[in-house]
Image (tube, rainbow, N blue to C red):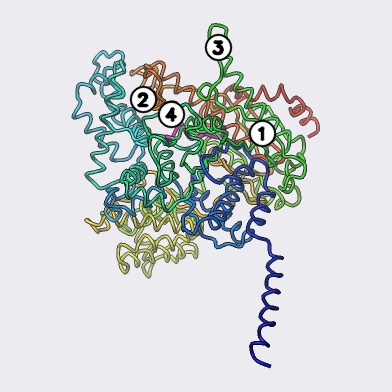
Amino acid sequence: MSDSKFTAPVVQELLDSELSERSLIPSLQEKILAIRNSLRPGQQQMADWQSGPLAISAVPGAGKSTGMAAAAAIAIARQYERSSSYRQLVVVTFTRSAAANIKAKIRKFLRDDLSLPQTGFFVYTLHGLALNIANRHSNLSGLQLENVILITPTQSHRFIRTAVEQWIVNHPDVYLRLLEGHQFDGEETERLRRQSVLRTEVLPELANMVIHEAKSSGISPEKLREWSKQTTDEYAILSVAAGLYEQYQNLMRSRDFIDYDDMILAALRVLENDSARHIEQNQIFAVFEDEAQDSSPLQTQLLEILASNREYQRENSLLLTPNSARAKRPADANSTQHSPLNLVRVGDPNQAINSTFTPADPIYFRQFCEECERIERLATMDRAGRSTRIIIEAANFALKWINNQWLATTKTNNKQQIPDNRQVPFRLQTIRPVEVGDPQANANPAPVGRGLELYTPRDIHHTVELLSQRVIELFGEDPTKNSAAILVRENRQGRWLAEALTPLCKEHKITLYDVGERDRRSHVPQEILALLQFCDRPHSPDYLKAALEALVQRQLIPTQDLNALASLPEEFLYPGPLATPQPETEQKAARLCRSLLRARLELPLYQLISFLALTLNYDQAELATADKLAERVNQQIASNNSMGGMLSALSEIVSSERFEPVETEDSEERYTRRGQLTIITMHKAKGLDWDYVFLPFLHENLIPGRFWVPPQSQFLGDFTLSEVARAQIRATLHEEAIIPDVNQAWEVAKNLKTSEEYRLLYVAMTRAKLLLWMSAAQKAPFTWSKPDNLQEQVPCPVFPALKRQFPECVVNLAAMSKQI
């Protein structure tokens, strides 16, 4: 038998077998369909996206991050099918931890559900994306990263302080007008007081605000001056702001420093070049943006340029420029139906809680939603399975009640105004429970207790008693089964609560995690500085004590009388042969301190910070933050490589700058561990959830709070310069007909603050799954810097409304006390 006659049937048989096996393997389309069918209707609309603009307005607990990850994986799979070109999906989110979270989810879908390589996409924070573009085209961006230093400007930063002083020298007449205020009798002591207030508080605050607000919108100092000509206020606030802004920019350029807004501006400079823009656009087939409600104008502009294809035409696209408004676009919806903008923006306008201290403004995402709705490209994810039904009902009621109260105060001529996105705090969007058969396990779970519990304690101490009692009941015999959090409005409340609850948690073996104290990575520069100052001057009792405190805080040496150790540094560090023998705890501290001094002598200067980070037994996130700090300091002292230069640079960072920590993938997990009672601010809690959520201290003086002028600056009037300037800048960006005067701008600023505080409460309420515990004590501090100074406090206006709407959820404290 010839070889050909023998092999032909065998080859055919193998081929038939392989084809038969392949028919049993799901095709890529079938895998895509399987993912789609596992999603909720709102998530499916995101997964069905193939091109063009799409807005997704998602309620809390709707699963937008899971939906976005699934939609991203499906979009990548379709790109594999339809195109041989290797173009990427770019996903942009708000924080580094969120970026790490969504990246892991996309990879899981690609690997486990689609059997595809875990490639074809990038996940960035907005500033990371901008820096990446600027770095690739450094000749166009003007950023030479090896020569510049990134800073986070704050009100106390030396550049802002220097800018203020230079502006005063250059504008003595305007400064004198501010000094006089509304009235001034020329008394020298009062003059000195006002000078101090202007130099250290009012003008630095105005400079800090305008740098963030105007720069993030692409507004130059020259443009601010032009706008100031349309205002008539006696202080020429926008003109003053422009001068401070200009001085700051000059200082930054002269020292080769940049801030985060400079990154975005540098990326936009790159994209103004046709060739560079085409290169960047040709690498991207679409852009997905998470947390879109927190975007600023420049961020929106950057993403929309990248989301456009190579045939992008500025006049025909949905591009938002810093000085343009959506209203100026062509009215014909069909003209944008086939827009080249491949952009999916996902967010919740009702969770916009950053606009009073960042340049973020929810109006831009609201407008994007309205435009997409006009061309039928708006999807609403309103089904949420996170919370039990009573919590959903409470959140929906709070939203509608606040909007109704808001509109009731804005009636004019006895006619109800038509609500729009600038009049009311919330977009009219109702959270709905999921449908039967929802893929989420235990969706809309059964409540624990009443699901919603409303308390009115006598005072804040009674609040702690009631909260403690409920925590013990909820955690029960096995604390590891449940997760719980206390959400506070400000860190000072958290510190007070942590101190009050620590004994209880130890007794009942409940882990207490105070995020405000233990999870701020800004402690890294301070601890490193303390050890370096000791290494530089070990004979200083103050420096020795500060170093020992850092070592005790890190639990590297036992707690002991540090004053006794630090009072005689030489005897403590190098006891003589006739000295009294040191106890073991003291010997351990001395050995560790001596090892630090040896390292100072033996290691090169640039390695010291990394060595100290290892000595302090930092975790992964802290080590990454220390490496970032070392790189920053070594770069800054390149021209003065000495211990003195290093200490000076570190001291500046600690005293005048909020050093940004490096986040890790498990940061959210640390906050929501089972068996743990987490104390966390309402702002920090966004994006997280727990079985039980406690909201104590719901008082009107904090939510919505009172917009007030500090007594020391009231000589300028019943307003603050910074808030007036912010409102005037935003009014111009929103293309309102006229720039509001001082009084109107102050009212706008108050409304912005009130709206955001109510949205913050809404975010806090929707973190709970099984039980939402809310309280407003009859007596509480006016300021939490003095927690013992109790006085009658009015509850947050929403709280009594909730009690009236849900009387069955009001806890009878008199009955409870009788039972006890």
Q: Which residue is mark 3?
A: 411
Q: CA distance from mark 2 to mark 1?
A: 36 Å
Q: Residues within 10 Å of mark 2 (few under 14, many from 20)?
A: many
Q: Amino acid at mark 2?
A: Ala
Q: Amino acid at mark 4?
A: Arg
Q: Is residue 726 above or below residue 91?
A: above
Q: Is residue 224 above or below residue 667?
A: above
User: Which x, y percent locates residue 550?
Assistant: 44, 54
- The chief SS type of the magenta part is loop
SS assignment at label 4: loop
- Quarter containing the C terminus: top right
Q: CA distance from mark 2 to mark 4?
A: 28 Å
Q: Which residue is mark 4?
A: 329
Q: Which mark is residue 431?
A: 1
Q: Which residue is mark 2?
A: 725
Q: Which mark is residue 262?
A: none
Give 709 or 767, whichever is nearer the viewer: 767
Labels 2 and 1 touching (C-beta < 8 A): no
Q: CA distance from mark 2 to mark 3?
A: 27 Å
Q: Amino acid at mark 3?
A: Lys
Sequence-wise, the earlier of marks 4 and 3 is 4
SS assignment at label 3: loop
Compared across the picture, whether 409 is left or right of 430 comes to left
Sequence-wise, the earlier of marks 1 and 3 is 3
User: Which x, y percent locates residue 786?
Assistant: 51, 31
Residue 193 seen in render:
no
Give 733 or 14, whichever is nearer the viewer: 14
Q: Which residues are magenta?
A: 350-359
Q: Residues within 10 Å of mark 1 (few under 14, many from 20)?
A: many
Looking at the image, which residue is at 31% across and 29% down?
Answer: 203
Residue 202 seen in render:
yes
